[in-house]
């Protein structure tokens, strides 16, 4: 029998939106993953720090995924203090579930910066990578990332089941031009981001008066 494969989807989720949710569901269905773990980061290593306290980002993820079977929230990075290193998260998942192989989900923008992550080679010894296309993001530009892709590209989802880790699949997903930064900027301007994210998440944002102040200045 083919081994179980689980998706690992890390993000600041500040806030979580339909661009995360629909694309993750596309991947779960197209690749045949048993589960996708949404893992909110505590601190972000490669980008600006999240604006919203970890507990509230966690709660937004919980609300957003509660209706979808196979979507699971994973608190390990929020509970771990300090920087969030994907390699450590994957190693701890591997240790807990040695019989399942791991697929790290990355949007094309995140994959583009992958060569500068902490221990990218080690990440590929622990997991496959599934790259989700994102509007406005062409293929990788960094020559190191291009080389990695050339060396490790999987051409079909089925190929991921032939190895335990180390392959990179580019997966077509619904193209939703939605980003957390755009949602935050709408809120700063006093506009509503309704229909870009789940209503329950919007209610939590409103009840807690989140994203009212422009932190980019
Ligand atoms: P921000 O606008 O603050 O940078 P974001 O919308 O990119 O945030 P993150 O939480 O940083 O959200 O993203 C987590 C992961 O989800 C990343 O791998 C990112 O590439 C991917 N992602 C986010 N939005 C989309 C989208 N619309 N389509 C495909 N992938 C996405």
Image (cartoon, rainbow, N blue to C red):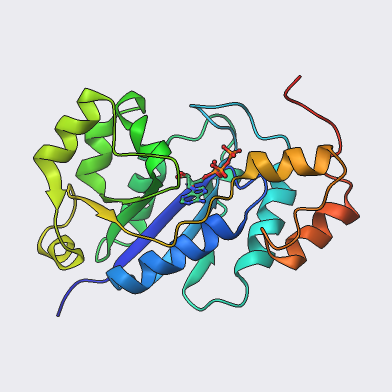
Residue 155 vs 140, above or below: the answer is below
Seen from this angle, which residue lies furthest front?
136
Q: In the figure, residue 181 lies in which quadrant?
A: top right
Is residue 211 visible to the viewer in this orientation of the structure?
Answer: no
Q: Quadrant of the N terminus?
A: bottom left
- Residue 1 sits above or below residue 182 on the image: below
Q: Residue at x 62, y 56 (%)?
A: 17
Q: Is residue 142 visible?
A: yes
Name the residue: 45% across, 68% down: 25
Q: Which residue shows up at 57% across the image and 30% down it?
A: 82
Residue 170 vertical position relative to residue 217 in the rendered view, above or below: below
Q: Nearer the viewer, residue 98 or 13?
A: 13
Residue drawn at 89 percent across, 46 percent down? 209
Going by the image, does 205 lie left or right of 178? right
The quarter of the rendered structure image containing the C terminus is top right
Residue farthest along the top direction in this orientation:
217
Residue 202 % position (x, y): 78, 59
């Amino acid at each position: 029998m083919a081994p179980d494969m689980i998706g690992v989807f890390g993000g600041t989720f500040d806030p979580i939106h339909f661009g995360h949710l629909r694309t993750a569901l596309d991947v779960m269905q197209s690749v045949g993953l048993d589960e996708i773990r949404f893992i909110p980061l505590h601190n972000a290593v490669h980008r600006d720090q999240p604006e919203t306290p970890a507990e509230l980002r966690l709660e937004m993820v919980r609300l957003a995924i509660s209706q979808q079977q196979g979507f699971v929230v994973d608190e390990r990075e929020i509970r771990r203090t300090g920087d969030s290193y994907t390699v450590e998260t994957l190693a701890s998942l591997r240790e807990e579930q040695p019989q399942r192989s791991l697929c790290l989900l990355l949007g094309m923008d995140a994959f583009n910066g992958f060569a500068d992550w902490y221990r990218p080679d080690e990440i590929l010894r622990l997991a496959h990578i599934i790259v989700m296309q994102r509007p406005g993001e062409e293929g990788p530009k960094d020559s190191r990332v291009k080389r990695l892709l050339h060396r490790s590209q999987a051409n079909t989802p089925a190929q991921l089941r032939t190895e335990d880790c180390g392959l990179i699949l580019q997966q077509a997903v619904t193209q939703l031009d939605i980003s957390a930064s755009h949602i935050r900027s709408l809120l700063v301007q006093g506009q509503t981001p309704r229909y870009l994210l789940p209503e329950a998440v919007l209610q939590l944002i409103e009840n807690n008066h989140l994203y009212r102040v422009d932190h980019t200045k």
